[in-house]
Amino acid sequence: MAALFGKRLRRSAMTTAVAAAAVAALSASQAPGLTDTQNGRQSTADATPSPGDSATGNSPYYTDLPPLNSPTAPPSTGPGGPVGTGTGVNEAGIPATVLDAYKKAEAELAATKPGCNLPWQLLAAIGKVESGQARGGNVDANGTTLKPILGPVLDGNGFARITDTDNGAYDGDTTHDRAVGPMQFIPSTWEWSGRDGNGDGKKDPNNIYDAALAAGHYLCRGDRDLSQSGGLHAAILSYNHSQEYLDTVLRWLEFYRKGTHEVPDGTGVQPRGRSDGGPSSSPSPSPSSPGTTSPSPGTSKPPKSPKPGGSPGTDPSKPGGGGSTSPTPPTPAETVARIEDAGTGTLDATAGDAFAERVAVRTENAAGKGVGTVKVKLTVVGDTDLTFSGGFKSVTVVTDSTGKATAPPLRAGEDTGEFTVRATVVDRKLPGLDYTATVSARQADALTRVGDTEQTCETGGQFADPVQVRATYKGDAADGVATTATLIKSKDDATENDKGPYFKDADGKAIRTLKGLKTDGDGRLQLPRIYADDATGTFLLRVSTTGGATLTIELKVTAAGATATPSASPSAT
């Protein structure tokens, strides 16, 4: 097993530029023209979404890169696992329990969200970058880490500042939050995205089965299709919004797709370089070197270089670090005095469509100057299916140098009416800014009958051919349009008739008005069977839609045994 702890083929000191170049080569090797077509929209494969809420709070991650050459299978397998020096063999090994958790998560998502097309190798790539596969697979038989894996304190000192949201329940910190577990969820995200992956009745971010399943669901939110590069990139960026993070995860994804193998728990390669330059994880004792000891994962901290005016290991720029005791300068959010509208147009759309206008806001200080790098959270208020693109009820955007930030497009659901979208400054208690978004019902401006067979029937019988209509709006099929069918008294009197043809309700009783009908995806609607009572003559059926389209159809009823008199084709008004 000594080979598993040999010299790394690629050091974490490789620059981001190398990673980006490798990703460019990877992208070039993919099939051309890959697009993200979720929600009927098409975007380029390398499109980058606006910054939003992330699973990790954009915490630091491990920057280790895989070998440039693809892994090859180990020459042989000994009692302790793979033995040999095949290309990339150390890096390609994934601890057994961790690998099992990834594959089980893939299987569950394949059953519950088949359109997402989640590959377990993506979970492995994120697990590698977030925690080095649970610090080399240091988990117990149930998949729970032997020691908690915690990210840095998110106190705004070099990282995002996220004040405590869980009272320390997950991360042990009652002042600020920290990313937790092998997939590094921040507590506020775990609270709604956590899953029970091992069936023990608990949702534990420190358990690899729970964390892997939660990560799979998080990546598959909305209508994402991870087989499309646009959806894949958006999913990874939603986990940690950084181009370098995206590049690194894509490298590992491609590496694992080309080959991997199982290694015993606790013997995986430990992570080294971290994106913030912070302390790396320490390797576990090598099984081939009995009697030796190493610091526990996550406890090794290299000594800090002395700073001018301070003793070794201190930082005079921080409280308690020696040297200057100058107060910490305010964060950008703390300088914001108000949040203003930045030219948002009228927010209206038809049910099922995207809004043409997007919410735009501006954060300003007391002097009216825009404040950049401020997080603004936009939330759809209340119980409605109105969302931002991707299916999110809330998103977080960051202001530019002028203090302006623009939200992703809103998308209307089927709920109609006026709804509120609220903008608030993150980490700042200021009055929010409310916008009204209006969703109108789907509509049609024309109705035509499908087919031209005359509708005839004898008294006491039923009309043989069902009535079919088609709705259009500006010449295109109008799907999902609310439609009403009424048997009326005359062309000039649209009140419900009290005799003649009728429909039947669920109890078989005669009714002459049907409401709540909707056209299908092609704008078509087939009405239920129509029956005749003992009244003879020509009767009228009027079909109308939201938007004002109407169609009137003649129904002929003759006495039983009589021959129907030919008449003109049905008329439409």
Image: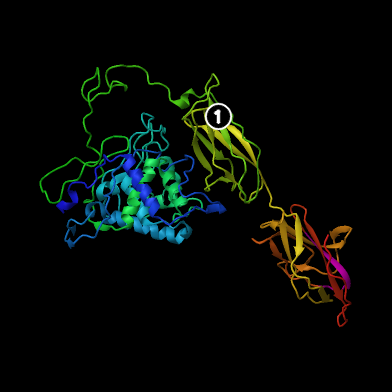
Task: State yes or no: residue 535 in magenta.
Answer: yes
Image quarter hosting the N terminus: bottom left
Image quarter hosting the C terminus: bottom right
- Does residue 4 appear in the picture of this structure? yes
Residue 477, image x, y percentages = 68, 58
Question: Looking at the image, how many numbered discs can be counted on the residues?
Answer: 1
- Kind of residue indicated by mark 1: Arg
- Is residue 557 depicted above or below 161 in this figure? below
SS for tag 1?
Answer: strand
Q: Quadrant of residue 184?
A: top left
Residue 436, image x, y percentages = 64, 38
Magenta range: 532-543
Residue furthest out toward the bottom: 561
Mark 1 neighbour class, 10 Å CA radius: few under 14, some 14 to 19, many 20 or more: many
Residue 290, image x, y percentages = 10, 49
85 left or right of 437 in image:
left
485 left or right of 17 in image:
right
**Residue closest to the eye, 48 or 328:** 48
- Is residue 332 depicted above or below 110 in this figure? above
Residue 159, image x, y percentages = 37, 32
Task: Check disc 1 and report the residue beneath it.
Answer: 362
